[in-house]
Image (cartoon, helix red, strand yellow):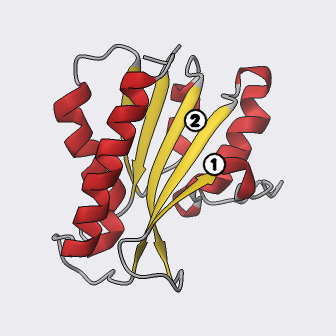
Amino acid sequence: MKTAIMGFGNPVRSDDGIGVYVIEELRKHLQDNPGVTLFDMGTSAFEVLFKLKGHQRILIVDAALSTGEPVGTIFKVPAEEIIRAPVDDPMVFLHSLKWDQALSYAKKIMGAEYPGDIKVYLVAIDNTRLEIELSDEVKRAGDKLITYILDDVNSSRYV
């Protein structure tokens, strides 16, 4: 049983890079774990759909702007709650496709092979300025997420 962990965000837009930060840190701990595949997604989504084949679980980390909650607040959300239905439009631009839309397409494309266990971790942010550093609050939230994910991976049947 394999787990895919996907970190999204733009690492040159300050706190928006939280997903990429989490993946970079997880590599230090999980590089030798054959049951886990780490994906530094940056701002892409569609390109990875076919790489998800063979994974039974997906964990996603991304930023959430304008949540109304304090910066650094962590949300754990079942993916089914927020996946958008794909737009059957042949002119969908792949570079503008977001992860929730990509998962909808993955579900449609993969059919019975689509992973049934998908969790989404979102971190509340308000800083997307052109900077390469995370704010202290968001970095602390990222470090908490790393601990949660490592505990989850190490204690699950998916290792």
The amino acid beneath tag 2 is: Leu
> Horizontal and vertical percent for residue 154?
36, 24
Image quarter for residue 155?
A: top left
* Vertical placement of residue 103 versus 111, above or below: below
**CA separation, marks 2 and 1?**
7 Å
Q: Residue furthest right?
A: 88
Quadrant of the frame with the C terminus: top left
Q: Earlier in the sequence, mark 2 or mark 1?
A: 2
Position of 140 with respect to 114 (left or right) is left
Label 1: which secondary element:
helix
How many dots with numbers?
2
The amino acid beneath tag 1 is: Ala
Visible residue check, residue 81? yes
In the rendered structure, find residue 49 and report the number of the disc placed on it.
2
Residue at 29% x, 57% y is: 142
Seen from the viewer's position, the closer of residues 143 and 47 is 143
